[in-house]
Amino acid sequence: MKKFIFLAGLGIGFVIGSRAGRGPYESLERTARQVAEDPEVQRRAAQARDTATRVAHDTAETVKDKAPGVAAGVQEKVSSAAGAAKDRVTGEAKNEKNLAEKSADSATSGGDAEVGEDKPLGS
């Protein structure tokens, strides 16, 4: 198939780029018609068409059979990820609340950072 595409491109390039006149174009056209009308080429083209149709049908059936299972698996993973994210957000909110409470407690208790009239700054 790749060879055919290459030859077709080569032929098109030849026709477009040819300055030799109508003769080479007509010769190429005649050869292309002979190839297209060849029973072997037609048989192989029909075989390729049938194979492509069969593969497309088989692929569609496989996707149809496996889609519900894949969808259920994706739904389960998304649900699990959403639950984990919710737990993480809830845990972070609790941690922030605990930190705020500890900060408020240390501010009222004095701590080492307290400076008063009876304490020098350099101690």
Image: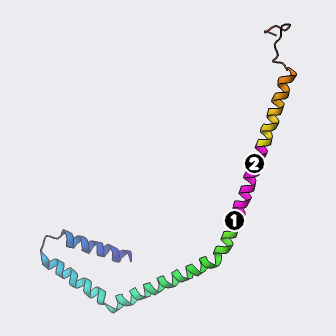
Q: Position of residue 107 (x, y in %)?
A: 82, 24
Q: CA distance from mark 1 to mark 2?
A: 20 Å
Q: Amino acid at mark 1?
A: Gln
- Mark 1, residue position: 75
Q: Is residue 113 magenta?
A: no
Badge 1 or badge 2: first in the primary sequence:
1
| Left or right for 48, reference 70 | left
Say which residue appears at 34% left-offset and 77% top-offset. Answer: 4
Q: Which residues are magenta?
A: 73-92
Q: In which quadrant of the rendered view does residue 122 lie?
A: top right
From the viewer's side, name the closer residue of 51 and 109. 109
| Left or right for 78, reference 41 | right
From the viewer's side, name the closer residue of 116 and 121. 116
Q: Position of residue 8 (x, y in %)?
A: 29, 75
- Mark 2, residue position: 88
Q: Amino acid at mark 2?
A: Arg
Q: In which quadrant of the rendered view does residue 24 lie?
A: bottom left
